[in-house]
Amino acid sequence: MSVTELALKPARARPGKALQKGQQTKAAIVDAALGLATQIGLEGLSIGALAEVTQMSKSGVFAHFGSREELQISVIREYHNRFEQEVFYPAMQAERGLPRLRSMFAQWMKRTSVEIDSGCIYISGAVEFDDRPGPVRDALASSVQTWHSAMTRAITQAKEAGHLDADVDEEQMLFEIHGLILALHYEARFLKTPGSIARANAGFEHILQRNGAAPALASRPRSTRSARKE
């Protein structure tokens, strides 16, 4: 059922059903808004543009959000929810420690590879709102920081399991891993550089090994670099 069909359905229903239909309509609008935002950015998102895409009236779209700002925040929340469903939760199925850290990066890369064509709200939004304080920037930064915290926990757990060196700086390691994702977007999406995905994956392996991980699927505790050289 399209957004327009949902919006124009008769309202003669019990309050519970009416509420459910309203939520379905809003979800459909947010879905359309997210697709639009990946093309024109969060800043380009407007009630008018979304009304045109969904073939709804401006007042109909506005009624679900109340403001352009709330629409933008709703899009950020939906993007974050999908990011968690596609990246975070699947990675949590892996064994704690290095296997989980590897899985988190692999899932992140899988989504990033798709977004080379569609665009990443976290990255494009940061460019748009890096110097613009307010609720939209706060929502965007909070989402990114939530993911960074999850990555930092995974690094810490890998260190505690003995899969990484005991003196690993988690924040530095996260910084370098995140840098790979940003570089991949620039190289693959903007410069169209061949082999960018392979280079990002190789970069991740270099970071792991430099911080004490053995090549491939290492999961056994390792206390020091010297122990590996013996």
Image (cartoon, rainbow, N blue to C red):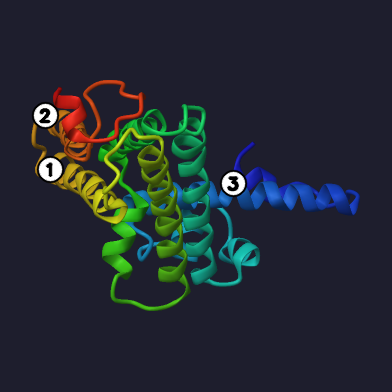
Please state the horizontal and vertical placement of residue 107, each as a whole percent of the image: 38, 32
The mark closer to the camera, 3 or 2, is 2
Residue at image mark 3 = 28
Q: What is the quadrant of residue 165 in the picture?
A: top left
> Based on the displayed image, in which of its 4 quarters is residue 111 positioned?
top left
Task: Give the SS element for disc 3.
Answer: helix
Q: Label 2 amino acid?
A: Gly
In the rendered image, the residue lying farthest to the bottom is: 133
- The answer to whether mark 3 and mark 1 are in CB contact below 8 A is no
Answer with left or right where residue 151 lies relative to residue 195. right
Image quarter hosting the N terminus:
top right
Depth check, mark 3 against mark 1: the one in front is 1
Res. 181 in view: yes
Between the residue at mark 1 and the residue at mark 2, the CA separation in whole angstroms equals: 9 Å
How many C-alpha atoms fall within 10 Å of the one at disc 2: few (<14), some, or many (≥20)? Answer: few
Could you tell me if residue 197 is visible in this image?
no
Q: CA distance from mark 3 to mark 1?
A: 33 Å
* Mark 3: amino acid: Ala
Q: Earlier in the sequence, mark 3 or mark 2?
A: 3
Please, is residue 58 above or below residue 148 in the view? Answer: below
The picture places residue 154, in percent across and down from the top left corner, at: 41, 42
1 or 2: tag closer to the N-terminus: 1
Q: What residue did someone put label 1 on?
A: 187
Q: Is 207 or 110 nearer to us in this picture?
A: 207
